[in-house]
Image: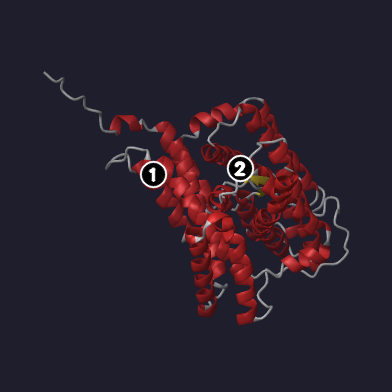
Amino acid sequence: MHWNKYKSNLSLLPTGVQWLFFLFTNTVLVPLSVGHALGMNAADITASMQRSFILTGLLCIVQAVWGHRYALMDGPAGIWWGLVLGIISSAPAMGMNPASVAASLTGGFLLAAIIGSLLALLGFLKLLQRIFTPVVMGIYLLLLTFQLANTFFKGMIGYNAGGTWDLKLAGLSLVIILFVSFIHLKAKGKLSQFSLLLGIIAGWIAYAICFGSSGSMGAASADNTAVWQWMPWGRPTFVPGIVMVGLLAGLVNMTNTLTSLLAADKLYQQQATEKQYIRSLLFTNLFSVAGACFGLIPFGTFASSIGFLENTKVVRRSALITGAALLMLVGLIPALSGWLALLPMSVGSTVLIVAYLQMFGTALNPLGRTALNSKTIYRVALPVLTGIGIMNIPASAFAGFPPLLTPLASNRLVVGVILALGMENLVPWSQFEPKATSLPASK
């Protein structure tokens, strides 16, 4: 019995390391990109990365043990990430410098998190569950899959600002995809569960052989800088326009939690209680407040975790907790942060592309159960194709919009979800669905 327990604990290490790479790859780009957009120096960006690793790891553990109690990643929310970068890029049009924008964003983060907590406690989640139908959930996951695939596809082919891409790098990425897919589909026993981890290890080695040690994720060199700097973005201010946009982003982020838990329900074959939803939102907002005080964007539950779980077939919370603890260790030891940041962008992006293929199927499931014809197809096609259309329009095309609306109008996920919510709750689609015909009684 002791030997079986020992083997079980030992098996947590590779699954935990696999979770570590998933958590790391989904976290590291956020403080890097936001730090560069705000013009932060290398030491400040490194400290921001370490804080992000520590708080993300701790939040994942807290959620798995006391919050939603699922093996789902909680980290820097993608909806906030895109919004923050959009607002920073629009700063000149708003007559603001990066420092004033950063202070205003801090105020928006804090206010959105506090109001989100109050809404969760006052029962807003019940309203959200009523309007967030299976069709809206499917559209949300579909657009999220497209958004993530677009981001990581550019990473795997080495797409740069000049509009060119690296054929040799793209070829290596294709080999990694085939390697990971082959292990996942053909490997016997538990080996298929580690397809993503094996893909990262083999891809990293292959990259080093083909390209040397260059092409990392671009982290600043780690040092012993003070990590816990209080209010590094300045004293929070409350600009009405940024606060309004932030509150809307906070509401969309709440739907992200709802989507993630509904999808996890199907995977775990159980139903989360109302208390699980409320605890999840409260912990998310609590950490978002803490993150805002240390110069981090708000947190959210990652619906993309569903694709990772479906790919690895490891749904144990202990595996996530192990990976999250390792991520905290990486944040606490600057040398480890610097070493993991050497993981080539293309390798991490390629493996995540494979993980998110499974989420595409998760998005299609609720849509496949919807009766579609020449009229009801609009409820799916209009939000999805509008979102994809915005995805292919350069940000410069939105220059004519009011500055504070630009981040929202240019975000395909927000626009698609708003369209889907409006159409689902304002149009009586049941009137356009084919009526079930009863068979004549047999004589």
Secondary structure beneath dot 1 equals helix
Which residue is rendered at x = 50% and y = 50% of the image?
359
Find disc 2 in the rendering and name its residue: 253
Task: Work out whether residue 21 or residue 241 is closer to the camera in this orientation and state it.
Answer: 21
Q: Which residue is mark 1?
A: 380
Q: Residue furthest left?
A: 443
Task: Using a 10 Å C-alpha cutoff, classify the residue at mark 2 as few (fewer than 14 neighbours), some (14 to 19) or many (20 or more).
Answer: many
Q: Is residue 290 above or below residue 101?
A: above
Residue 114: image quadrant is top right
Q: Which mark is residue 275?
A: none
Amino acid beneath label 2: Asn
**Relative to 43, 148 lies left or right:** left
Image x and y of residue 198, in percent: 60, 64
Residue 47 appears left or right of 88: right
137 sits to left or right of 24: left
Quadrant into which the N terminus falls: top right
Residue type pointed to by label 1? Val
Q: Residue at x 55, y 57 (%)?
A: 192
Please state the horizontal and vertical placement of residue 65, each as a whole percent of the image: 72, 38
Residue 87 placement (x, y as % from top left): 64, 54
Q: Residues within 10 Å of mark 1 (few under 14, many from 20)?
A: many
Q: Would residue 167 be visible to someone looking at this image?
A: yes
Between discs 2 and 1, the one toward the N terminus: 2
